[in-house]
Image (cartoon, rainbow, N blue to C red):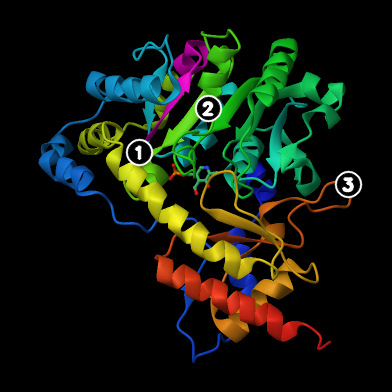
Amino acid sequence: MNPLFNKLQPYPFERLRALLDGVTPNPALAPVNLSIGEPKHPTPALVTDALVGALGGLAAYPPTAGSEALRDAIAGWLRRRYGLAQLDPARQVLPINGSREALFAFAQTVVDGRADALVVLPNPFYQIYEGAALLAGATPYYVEQAADNGFRCDWRSVPEAVWRRTQLLYVCSPANPTGAVMPLEEWRLLFELSDRFGFAIASDECYSEIYFDEASPPLGALQAAQALGRADYRRVIAFTSLSKRSNVPGMRSGFVAGDAELIRPFLLYRTYHGSAMSLSVAAASVAAWGDEAHVQDNRSQYRAKFDALEPLLAGVLRTSRPQAGFYFWAGVPGGDDTAFVRELYRQYNVLTLPGSYLARETGGRNPGRGLIRLALVEPLAQCVEGATRIRRFVEDRRPNP
Ligand SMILES: Cc1ncc(COP(=O)(O)O)c(C=O)c1O
């Protein structure tokens, strides 16, 4: 066996299962699941119709680079969404089978096997980044997203000796779980560091289309690059997905776009790995990227849930509406996130995720400790029911005045 497997950490949901093992949830209450970030709004008919209409695609091996029609549809979406003036769909765009596999595979392409290689990650973070770094033979270096810094990473706290060994930096904006969106100034700093030290930047943008103000969508990496005079997108690659945007987590469809010098070796890697998108899925993806009405409708459903839950959680959890995404990242009274999650499940049959499972301890501190993540993916009524029970749970536990 590859000895690097021993370095992999158990996945947060595995740890959640272990935490709740032997705990019987209150049988008088129907379960409410706020733990997992799997979109649950219905898949739009325009996507399922296109998929069914293209079932003939199952009879052919798909090209790893994707069809011209798909790359053109993606490039068209990127131009509309981010105002990109220069983008070559043949060299700077590649379809992927959901962002997860590509976020993992990208590290295998860019990490060069040097023993002291580092991959820098935000903390808390999506665990795939860490596993990707470890299996590429690199060591992860975690940069805290602290509440007192607006859940932004303090990149200036990273020692120069670390940047010198860094081969890849993962960023996530809008971030899971914090919802923080990176502003242009943060991109300016990261691009300067990347120019100075030569590392690649993988920008995970799978929540880019889940936001509140229709007039100000989150800034994307390529948009930031263009705004800062880097129209060749050097050393940056953005990962975007249909899973959350179009409610198709099971379709496994997304794309990477950015620096052609990074995309070329990534395509080679993917050719060997066998990561080509089915032609049927590609046809459904073309339909999805070409329509925004269903995405606006999706956003309005999430907005309604945040509107309803914000007043319910006010005063019981330390939280506020995120900048984007569909999670509340919420501080719990008493500061023990695992005990809170377990007791809430036992007494009120509401499933949430301990924040400490989404982060690593560095310098004696786990930046997820004392927080929980609530995913607002279930229908509005269930989310309201979950938040109402959380409110009751916290109020029950308050000492009498
Ligand atoms: C931060 C983040 N990145 C990537 C993904 C992967 O999404 P997909 O593979 O469906 O595109 C997820 C899924 O939950 C996520 O939360």
| Residue on which disc 2 sits | 220
Cβ–Cβ below 8 Å for labels 1 and 2? Answer: no
Q: Residues within 10 Å of mark 1 (few under 14, many from 20)?
A: many
Give the residue type that dot 3 points to. Answer: Gly
Instruction: State left or right for residue 118 relative to residue 44.
Output: right
Q: Nearer the viewer, residue 171 or 390?
A: 390
Give the residue type that dot 1 points to. Answer: Ser
| Residue on which disc 1 sits | 253
Find the distance from the CA under tag 2 to the CA under tag 3: 31 Å
Find the distance from the CA under tag 3 to the CA under tag 1: 38 Å
| Residue on which disc 3 sits | 363
Q: Indicate which disc residue 99 carries.
A: none
Q: Residue at x 78, y 29 (%)?
A: 155
Instruction: Provide residue 264's location: percent of width, then percent of height.
Output: 45, 14
Q: Nearer the viewer, residue 375 or 163?
A: 375
Rendering quarter of residue 245: top left
* Segment colored magenta: 252-265
